[in-house]
Amino acid sequence: MRIPIAEAGRHAGETVEIAGWLYNLRRSGKIVFPLLRDGSGVLQCVAVKSALPEETFETLKNLTQESSLVVRGKLRAEQRAPGGYEMDVESAEVVQRVAEDTPYPITPKDHGIDFLMDHRHLWLRSRRQHAVLRVRHEIIRAIRDYFDSNGFTLVDTPIFTPAACEGTTTLFPVQYFEDETLYLTQSGQLYNEATAMAFGKVYCFGPTFRAEKSKTRRHLTEFWMVEPEMAYATLEDVKRVAEELVVFIIGRVLENRRPELAVLERDVSKLEAAKAPFPRISYDQAVKILQAKGSEIQWGGDLGGTDETLLAEDYSSPVMVDRYPAQVKAFYFQPDAERPELALGVDVLAPEGYGELIGGGQRIHDYDLLVRRIREHDLPPEAFNWYLDLRRYGSVPHGGFGMGVERTVAWMCGLDHVRETIAFPRMLYRTRP
Ligand code: 4AD
Ligand code: MG
């Protein structure tokens, strides 16, 4: 019977078949130890010369890294083996042998990051990358489960869009047939606002694009964002949902992905320490705290990456910073009723220097104000006519946020760069493979 390595524990004492790839090979005289991976796990096999046909033993002994093969044998508990089980090989069949003159390029020695990135299509097979992407999958599953079980309807939004959502300086234009220029979406928010008026609570979840010429460890040009949007909601509702979502994700990752976090040598106590209620501070307070810590920030300016790190270092949970000056935020933010120079927006900053995980807030629901803002931001009014309809027909206070998947993965896994959080990252200087 063919089984995935992950299920080896349920088949101890049985003879089974495993289809995989040779991850590593150790030789010790008349015994060889092929380490097999199959995508679900890693299994150490034991091939004893005296117990096998000569040809089988020689084949295994000389097998090259990443050759594909199917092995059969009996499983046995072995505490010292990775995963806790070992297989005594009875037969083996090579599916494709990696040729000696084109050996697998990624060896256990240290390679530079550029080399690994150039070989990303192969690098994904390594144990670390495998662990990162499994944590990513868990996070995405948790996000979907959270919204699906809390009354949100998934309504995905278009990727070809006629106008900017998050500022015109980070748009990627696309030639759309002969005579139209469209842009890759920066955010599904504007469309979410329409679907929220139809469904009440919605979310979209897809790739988003920013032509940001930043070469930081937090920026990709293509990243995945989940964006909930709620009708009849205020900034406080947005903060509550953001906090609940983050807590839910951490819980799931700790529940289901401890082995992967161990591979990554992640200090899980840092994740365990992130608990609700998250600290909540205003932008005003943030500026004072930062100035006291020696930051150059002046009231009115946006927080830089370093400021975010400085601010978050005082807390073990993500910190929520609200009410930024409207001038540093996008056009759609509802102003604070008492201090209209402030936007009813919130950023959620991760601990340990991972920066802004979530950005969101309450949207303008007043028609005239929104028209004014579109004009002030020099946005093409004709592209926003449909959006203004939402303020003509039953407008209500509403809000939502966007959470970047890659930054969340980087934080949970404790990675020093977002490039490893997605299978094929797109960055300023990286568009291949
Ligand atoms: O703060 P941002 O730009 O917010 C919006 O796009 C809103 N329209 C979302 C909404 O309210 N529906 O982006 C939201 C999140 C950030 O907090 C960050 O996690 C991530 O998206 N993000 C990026 N991640 C990787 N690379 C980039 N270049 C990113 N830009 C934003
Ligand atoms: Mg933001």
Image (cartoon, rainbow, N blue to C red):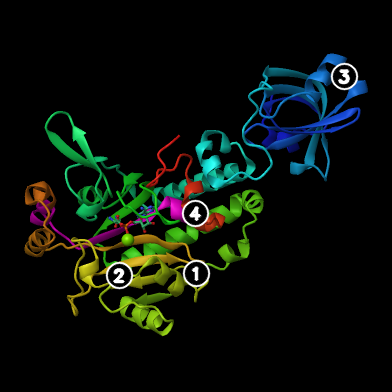
- For label 1, the residue is 317
| Ligand 1 picture quarter | bottom left
| Label 2 Cα crowd, 10 Å radius (few <14 / some 14-19 / many 20+) | some
Residue 80 placement (x, y as % from top left): 82, 45
Q: Are marks 2 and 1 in contact (CB under 8 Å)?
A: no
Q: Residue at x 8, y 63 (%)?
A: 372
* 406 in relation to 285, above or below: above
Residue 126 placement (x, y as % from top left): 62, 39
Indicate which label's residue lies in the foreground, 3 or 4: 4
Screen quadrant of the C terminus: top left
Indicate which label's residue lies in the foreground, 3 or 1: 3
Q: Secondary structure at mark 4?
A: loop
**Distance (Cα) linking label 2 and label 1:** 22 Å
Q: Are marks 2 and 3 in contact (CB under 8 Å)?
A: no
Q: Which residues are magenta?
A: 388-410
Q: Residue at x 56, y 53 (%)?
A: 253
Q: Are marks 3 and 1 in contact (CB under 8 Å)?
A: no
Total numbered labels placed on residues in the image: 4
**Distance (Cα) linking label 1 and label 4:** 20 Å
